[in-house]
């Protein structure tokens, strides 16, 4: 089993403790995490990415317990093994599209995928040398997906990737994430409140606000 999350609990300062369901995902599998706004979905994603430390429980990715790593070791492990598609692209404005992806290569300390080939597969091969400031919302999202995929991670985490999309583009983005994850043999976890995604990923769990 590639990813195991057991008995996870977390409490933001001044807020109630949130308990999360058990998670098991293997390479090449896709899991949907559903929950309403404020239910703790993004907190769960941050726990799985090692961006937050749980109050109790553990996250084990490829046999490595994330809580056993810290500082630079955790950053390097995350860079090599986890690709994150954030709700907002968070692209670096001073860099063009290609340079944003090259930075992901740099931080992961691994060669990863060919950048131009990946951008072409995502339908934005002609944007490689374009300023990220001139991209449409959809193009910026695809660059964000490319950045998560370019290091050939073992785990892809996507936070609300369809929240601002119509039905047609929702289907396109989910198909894109699933096909790319399968191509590189990665596990895919999509965290969302968007019930439409259940049509494309039948394996799901729900996070319920306490």
Image: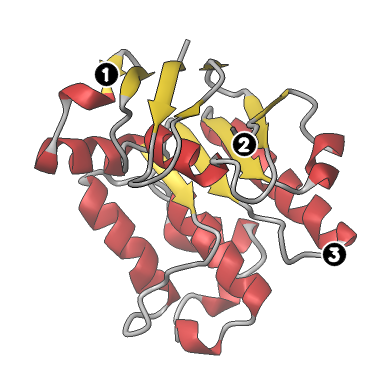
Q: Eyeballing the image, is 104 above or below 177?
A: below
Task: Please tell me in which quadrant of the rendered image residue 73 appears.
Answer: top left
| Disc 2: which residue | 209
Q: Residues within 10 Å of mark 3 (few under 14, many from 20)?
A: few
205 relative position to 128: left or right: right
86 relative position to 108: left or right: right
> Residue 43, how many percent across, how many down?
46, 42
> From the viewer's perspective, is the residue at label 2 or at label 1 nearer?
2
Q: Earlier in the sequence, mark 2 or mark 3?
A: 3
Q: Residue at x 81, y 61 (%)?
A: 169
* Helix, strand or loop under label 1: strand
Task: Please tell me in which quadrant of the rendered image residue 49 appears.
Answer: top left
Looking at the image, do the residues carrying marks 2 and 1 touch, with CB atoms under 8 Å apart?
no
Q: Residue extending furthest bottom?
A: 134
* Colour mapping: secondary structure
Q: CA distance from mark 2 to mark 3?
A: 27 Å
């Amino acid at each position: 089993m590639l990813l195991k999350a057991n008995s996870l609990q977390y409490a933001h300062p001044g807020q109630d403790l949130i308990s999360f369901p058990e998670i098991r995902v293997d390479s090449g599998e896709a899991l949907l995490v559903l929950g309403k706004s404020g239910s703790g979905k993004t907190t769960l994603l941050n726990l799985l990415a090692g961006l937050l430390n749980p109050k109790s429980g553990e996250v084990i990715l490829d046999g490595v317990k994330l809580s056993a790593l810290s500082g630079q070791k955790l950053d390097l492990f995350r860079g090599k093994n986890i690709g994150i598609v954030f709700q907002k692209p968070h692209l670096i404005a001073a860099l063009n599209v290609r340079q944003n992806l090259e930075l992901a290569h740099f931080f992961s300390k691994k060669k990863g995928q060919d950048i131009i080939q990946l951008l072409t597969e995502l339908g934005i091969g002609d944007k490689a040398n374009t300023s990220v400031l001139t991209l449409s919302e959809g193009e910026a999202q695809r660059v964000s997906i490319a950045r998560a995929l370019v290091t050939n991670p073992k785990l892809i985490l996507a936070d609300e990737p369809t929240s601002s999309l119509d039905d047609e583009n929702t289907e396109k983005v989910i198909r894109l994430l699933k096909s790319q994850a399968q191509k590189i043999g990665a596990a895919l976890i999509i965290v969302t409140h968007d019930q439409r995604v259940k049509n494309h990923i039948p394996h799901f769990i729900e996070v319920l606000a306490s």
